[in-house]
Amino acid sequence: MNKELLEKYIIGETNEEENRSIQHWLEQNSDNNAEYLKIKKMWDSLPQPLETPAVDVDQAWANFKAARDKRTASTALAVEKKTIAMGWNWWAAAGILLICSLGFYVFNNSYKQEKQLFSNESVLKDSLPDGSLVTLNKNSIMTYSNNWIDKQRRVKLEQGEVFFQVFKDKEHPFVIETGKSKITVLGTSFNVRRMTDATEVIVATGLVKVSYSNKEVYLHPKEMITVRDNDTTKVSVKQTADQFYKYYVDREFVFENTSLERVVALLNKAYDQKIVIDQAADKKLLLTATFEQNSLSEILKIIADTFKCKVIIKDSIIHLTR
């Protein structure tokens, strides 16, 4: 994609046809989106022009000449001139101080302001002030402060699910607060899902520390943990090859010995459909498969062929039945 066209898109100068072209390019793969976020971050980091008070240069010069012409050798007039000059300098200094104070106030408040990312009905990809990348699943809310000039980079996941690709910075740990859990990393990638009364963490790369109820657990790649707010006695680390988050991050489903019940739950969420398993025993069937950019009908056909079942649609509900 042409860099100049992306820059026009960032500053809102593209037309509808160019917007559609760029949106199509962004959806093709994650590399394109990463390139766009890198350019957008560069633009966002550029300093904004400060408004300065208008100065009438001609009038100022005329005032200067008038003051110069009125100079005399009289001591009294010299003293008066000095007094006027001192008064003018005082007001000028006061004006400069006022402008600087207002500038600092605006700058300081802008950095203290809390930012919110809300994905609404579509997946949202964005970057954070430190260069870390986040992908928010549908209907997810995450907040963070502009003031990251601190010992820690803190964010808060209020609801939904987010995949984090954290920029490595040993001096400033990346901390996520959600529910009664706290997740701390230096530079890694992982998925956090906030449910009504629990938090689920799955690690893709690196090392992740999960803190809850004065306890700490370290997770490695392909490990996951679920921490319930009101019951932390049954928390345990589990090995998982399933990368459930990839369906909204990369439009890819990766299942390895995954229960059909869990598979259906993800399909319902990803495609906004209602799929039910009619036979209770079928819910425990295990599926190992990878789907890349497949339609729902294609996935259901493979599931039906694998488990020798049928797909029936009745009253807008999709049934997996015998």
Image (tube, rainbow, N blue to C red):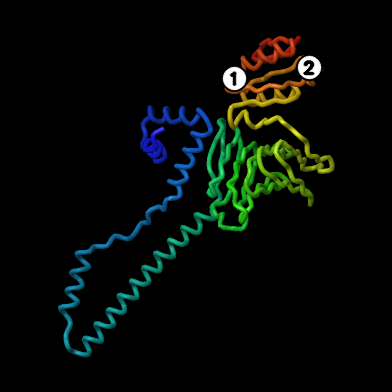
Q: Considering only vertical position in the picture, is 155 above or below 96?
A: above
Q: Which mark is residue 113?
A: none
Q: Considering only vertical position in the picture, is 140 above or below 75?
A: above
Q: In which quarter of the image is residue 203?
A: top right
Residue 181, horizontal then vertical, whole percent: 72, 46
Q: Considering only vertical position in the picture, is 131 above or below 309?
A: below
Amino acid carrying label 2: it is Asp
Residue 292, horizontal then vertical, whole percent: 60, 23
Q: In which quarter of the image is the C terminus?
A: top right
The residue under label 1 is 294
Q: Looking at the image, which residue is at 59% across and 32% down?
A: 249
Q: In which quarter of the image is the N terminus?
A: top left
Q: Looking at the image, which residue is at 55% across and 31% down?
A: 122
* Nearer to me, 255 or 271: 255
Please say if the residues under marks 2 and 1 sit with CB atoms less than 8 Å apart. Answer: no
Decide: few, some or many residues near mark 1? Use Cα within 10 Å; few <14, some 14-19, many ≥20.
Answer: few
Circle 2: element type: helix
Residue 197 horizontal side relative to residue 99, left or right: right
Which of discs 2 and 1 lies nearer the camera? The answer is 1
Residue 287, horizontal then vertical, whole percent: 73, 21
Q: In which quarter of the image is residue 191?
A: top right
Amino acid carrying label 1: it is Asn
The residue under label 2 is 282
Q: Considering only vertical position in the picture, is 172 above or below 161?
A: below
* Nearer to me, 204 or 321: 204
Q: Looking at the image, which residue is at 55% across and 47% down?
A: 115
Disc 2/disc 1 C-alpha distance (Å): 23 Å
Residue 92 horizontal side relative to residue 261, left or right: left
Farthest bottom residue in view: 75
Residue 230 horizontal side relative to residue 206, left or right: right
